[in-house]
Image (tube, rainbow, N blue to C red):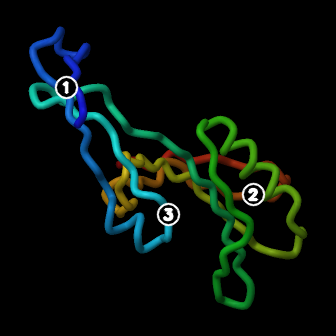
Amino acid sequence: MATPVKCTECDGRGWKIVTRRGCVAAMGLHMEQSSREDCLYCDGPEQLAEMFEWEVFLTSGGTEELGPCGTGPGQATSMDALRTALLRLETNVSAWGRIIHRVYDFGTLPDDWSRHVIFRTSVDPAGAVRFERVSS
């Protein structure tokens, strides 16, 4: 039997319990089930993770294809990776890219509400990568 633990986030007014989240998703992905301690009184500490995804799209013959892509925990790192990927492409291929801000919650599958495009990029005729902020 588990011993109840007083919550430190709400100064001991609540008790923590162990809950399981994402059990169906974890079983579908053949991963271990996840668990965390939740307070019965407060929301507790925030368990969100921010990630920045970058994607390159290649336009050739009127069709767009997904090119190099990746993800990282920092916006600046993702912007640098996207810039590098765009500059490494051949000059005869039309390419553009985007940076996506995504928020992951503990034990849940990502969905479209947690995904926002924050930058669109293009390569100008001089060969420089231009970032344009997307209004939300």
Q: Is residue 104 above or below residue 24?
A: above
* Residue at x 47% of width, y 54% of height: 117
Type of residue at label 1?
Answer: Pro
Mark found first going from the N terminus, 2 or 1: 1
Picture coordinates of residue 26, whole percent (x, y)? 41, 64
In this view, the residue in front, 100 or 34, is 34
Quarter of image, res 16: top left
Q: Is residue 5 above or below residue 96?
A: above
Identify the disc placed on residue 4.
1
Q: Measure the alpha-carbon separation of dots 3 and 2.
A: 41 Å
Q: What residue is pinned by disc 2?
A: 123
Count neighbours of disc 3 (C-alpha within 10 A) and say few if under 14, some if 14 to 19, many if 20 or more.
few
Q: Secondary structure at mark 1?
A: loop
Q: Residue furthest top?
A: 11
Q: Secondary structure at mark 2?
A: strand
> In which quadrant of the rendered image does the N terminus lie?
top left
* Residue at x 82% of width, y 50% of height: 84
* Residue at x 24% of width, y 26% of height: 44
Q: Secondary structure at mark 3?
A: loop
Q: Measure the alpha-carbon separation of dots 3 and 1.
A: 28 Å
Type of residue at label 2?
Answer: Val
Type of residue at label 3?
Answer: Met
In this view, the residue in front, 112 or 46, is 46
Mark found first going from the N terminus, 3 or 2: 3
